[in-house]
Image (spheres, grey):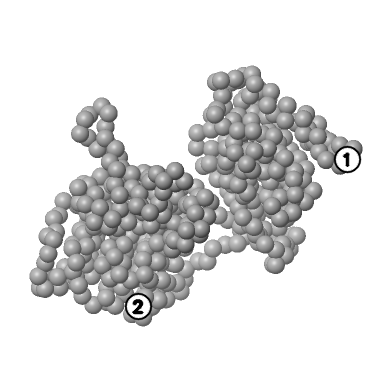
């Protein structure tokens, strides 16, 4: 089950949308399944002409906001969509009511035992999802906290998955990169761009960070890639850089202004403090130009480092899975540098697929190991332009990536294991020599589980031809 949180200004516009026909007449039998009051007390009544009368419900939801006044949020309407997977059975109204209450309890907005929580209702107009609508003002006149509400919703969804035997999803552990917004995706399609700017920038930043040993080299590499860079200076200590933002020259908003992304908006581990922590262990310097003999030496160094790191991962997998925690991140560095050096889109695809497998939960910086440091050092040396037999290098990287998949499996991080395996399969396509280690890793690799053991698989299965639909509709113009 997936939960998505949005914010808006007017509760009326959202309710009109939820009870309306939808963009493609997909809203069927809209009704409240649960709320801060019994559904029968707040369900909008039918007018004689057949429409709904929302005045009572809107008034009740807005009352606490009026009492809170200017102390409230600028966007006081909290909107959460909870959606089951298309493979899951159809939940009943009572079960969806439990889902909604779990979310409101976990977020702290309206715990089941708190009579003074926010006012809210859960509207159902389809088999596979509900919309929770809340106004962000407690009934005791105080302002509720919404800090990290997305992660609390994720925890609630996982609890519901276990309770009802639904399809298991990945945890909200910040190992996934920030996804492009709907507006970014639509803009990319309208303008005929190959990739979303946020994704392109993340690839540039990761590659620049992988080939650099300091922030000076990092910023020079970005500028060389024609990425615009804006450094954030400290207001307390003049001359001190505390952060950065990047932009593409072609990516501008409707006013013609550049659209900037801070490192943290690309991925949790790409903030400047996180990158600095990575570079502390990488003081080696590589020259701008190297002779033929030195290029071969560097190539051999990279291959050796990759093989040793893979061996270290296999030892950690068999013994202590946390013993090589920095190697997956270093593997990502090597993948991105190799993709840029060899100018191979298949390698770039593998690096993108591997992305989530590289990170530690909650953007933690793992303690350095010798294997991880040597692998990162080798990646930086490779970035200088060394050349060698591409097929051999890709095969060694594939074996390293497959070892990461085994490690993530041993750690019980299935979303990351799946990402690593997908990258290994991409590498097998890029080089036939990489096929053997990939097949070896895949032989005993567990597949994602669609339903936990013990779930009743014969209970109201969904039609296989049914469209899953989008995760959630965007807010209506009135809601925005």
Residue at image location 57% in from the left, 37% down from the top? 7
x and y percentages locating residue 48 in the rendered image: 90, 38
> Which of the pair 453/464 is nearer the observer?
464
Helix, strand or loop under label 2: loop
Observer able to see residue 198? yes
> Splitting the image into 4 quarters, where does residue 398 fall?
bottom left
Dividing the image into 4 quarters, which one contains the C terminus? Answer: top right
Name above or below for residue 205 compared with residue 304.
above
Q: Residues within 10 Å of mark 1 (few under 14, many from 20)?
A: few
Is 197 on the left-hand or right-hand side of 331? right
Asked whether residue 319 is in view, the answer is no
Name the residue that disc number 2 marks: 431
Residue closer to the observer: 281 or 391: 391
- Tell me what residue is drawn at x 47 percent, y 46 percent: 254
What number is the disc on residue 76? none
Q: Is residue 299 left or right of residue 79?
A: left
Of the residues under marks 2 and 1, which one precedes in the sequence? Answer: 1
162 with respect to 186 (left or right): right
Mark seen at residue 49: 1
Percent position of residue 240, x then y: 22, 35
């Amino acid at each position: 089950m997936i939960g998505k949180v949005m914010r808006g200004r007017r509760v009326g516009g959202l309710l009109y949308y939820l009870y309306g026909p939808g963009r493609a007449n997909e809203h069927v039998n809209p009704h409240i399944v649960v709320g801060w009051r019994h559904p029968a007390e707040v369900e909008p009544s039918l007018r004689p002409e057949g429409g709904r009368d929302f005045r009572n419900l809107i008034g009740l939801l807005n009352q606490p906001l009026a009492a809170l006044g200017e102390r409230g949020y600028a966007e006081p309407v909290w909107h959460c969509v909870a959606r089951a997977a298309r493979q899951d059975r159809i939940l009943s109204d009572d079960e969806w009511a439990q889902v909604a209450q779990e979310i409101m309890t976990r977020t702290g907005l309206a715990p089941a035992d708190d009579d003074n929580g926010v006012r809210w209702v859960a509207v159902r107009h389809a088999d596979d999802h509900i919309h929770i609508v809340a106004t962000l003002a407690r009934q005791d006149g105080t302002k509720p906290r919404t800090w990290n509400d997305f992660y609390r919703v994720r925890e609630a969804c996982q609890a519901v998955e276990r309770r009802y035997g639904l399809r298991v999803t990945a945890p909200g552990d910040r190992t996934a990169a920030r996804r492009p917004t709907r507006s970014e995706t639509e803009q990319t399609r309208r303008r005929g761009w190959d990739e979303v700017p946020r994704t392109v920038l993340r690839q540039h930043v990761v590659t620049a960070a992988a080939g650099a040993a300091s922030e000076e080299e990092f910023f020079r590499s970005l500028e060389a890639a024609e990425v615009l860079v804006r450094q954030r200076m400290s207001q307390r200590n003049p001359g001190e850089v505390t952060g950065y933002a990047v932009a593409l020259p072609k990516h501008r908003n409707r006013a013609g202004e550049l659209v900037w992304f801070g490192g943290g908006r690309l991925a949790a581990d790409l903030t400047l403090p996180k990158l600095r922590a990575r570079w502390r262990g990488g003081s080696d310097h590589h020259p701008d130009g190297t002779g033929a003999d030195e290029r071969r030496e560097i190539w051999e160094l990279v291959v050796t480092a990759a093989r040793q790191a893979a061996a270290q991962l296999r030892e950690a997998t068999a013994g202590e899975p946390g013993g090589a925690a920095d190697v997956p991140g270093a593997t990502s560095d090597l993948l991105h540098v190799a993709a840029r050096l060899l100018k191979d889109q298949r390698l770039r695809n593998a690096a993108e697929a591997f992305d989530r497998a590289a990170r530690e939960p909650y953007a933690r910086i793992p303690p350095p190991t010798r294997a991880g440091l040597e692998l990162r050092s080798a990646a930086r040396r490779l970035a200088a332009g060394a050349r060698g037999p591409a097929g051999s290098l890709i095969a060694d990287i594939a074996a390293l990536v497959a070892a990461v998949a085994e490690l993530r499996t041993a750690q019980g991080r299935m979303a990351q294991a799946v990402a690593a395996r997908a990258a290994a399969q991409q590498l097998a396509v890029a080089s036939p020599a990489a096929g053997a280690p990939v097949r070896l890793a895949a032989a005993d690799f567990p597949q994602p589980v669609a339903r936990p053991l013990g779930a009743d698989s014969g209970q109201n299965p969904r039609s296989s031809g049914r469209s899953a639909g989008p995760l959630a509709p965007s807010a209506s113009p009135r809601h925005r």
